Image: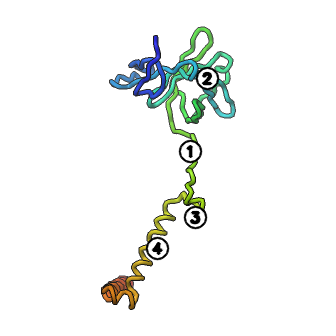
Amino acid sequence: MRAVVSRRCGIWAFPPTLIALSAMETTEPGYFRCQVPNELSNAHVRAGRRKFRAGVQETSIDGYTILVGPKEARKLKVGKPWILEHQGASIEVHPQWFFNSPDGHVQIGLRRLRDLTPPEPIRRSLLVRMGGVRYANPSVSATAYGGFVLGLFLLLALPGLGDRLGTSDRIQNTLRWVVGEVNKSIDQM
């Protein structure tokens, strides 16, 4: 069997096969599982405080199939989510089904719960280095933009510049109207 690039899997894999899970009987067309080659199958699973080696056999959009050796099979504890560390990613998984083979190996179907891999850090540009602090919170930039618009609004309301541009009277009338409406609302309470 030769390896091909699968569009659904996004990695070098053997051709995807349409299968039905024994426990769930998935019969949806388009439910694909992609086999993982041996050189990419090394993984670690943390179950509670214990960490053991496993081999990822197949991947799909919602989970993994792993193979655990007989020595590590004794360390398995079910009940809490596990963390699968595979190809630089940490994924919280929940065991769905087990298959014990006669030689002691255990094949486990894992359901993906959430990705725990930390996001890549934001690169700093030359302008940010010169300008100072980088803000990760978008509300800071929204506040700065609001302050800029308010400052521009007040600049256009100044008697000297506003009179020349013809905006002073309109802005002052608008502010008087807003203050009057707020006063009416407060008086009605």
Query: What is the x, y in percent for residue 28?
Result: 34, 25
Say which residue appears at 32% left-offset and 85% top-offset.
165
Nearest to viewer (mark 2 / mark 4)? 4
Circle 4 residue: 147
Spatial CA distance of label 2 from label 1 is 26 Å
The residue furthest top is 102
Q: Earlier in the sequence, mark 3 or mark 2?
A: 2
Mark 1 belongs to which amino acid? Glu
Mark 3 belongs to which amino acid? Gly
Q: Residues within 10 Å of mark 2 (few under 14, many from 20)?
A: many
Image position of 54 with respect to 158: above or below: above
Spatial CA distance of label 2 from label 4 is 55 Å
Q: Nearer the viewer, residue 62 or 36?
A: 36
For residue 31, say whether it is visible: yes
**What element does badge 3 sit on?**
helix
Of the numbered discs in the image, which one, if any, rests on residue 131? Answer: 3
Spatial CA distance of label 3 from label 1 is 22 Å
Q: Nearer the viewer, residue 138 or 163?
A: 163
Circle 2 residue: 54
Q: Earlier in the sequence, mark 2 or mark 4?
A: 2
For residue 84, say whether it is visible: no
Nearest to viewer (mark 3 / mark 4)? 3
**What element does badge 1 sit on?**
loop
* Image quarter hosting the C terminus: bottom left
Residue 53, quarter of the rendered image: top right
Circle 1 residue: 120
**What element does badge 2 sit on?**
strand
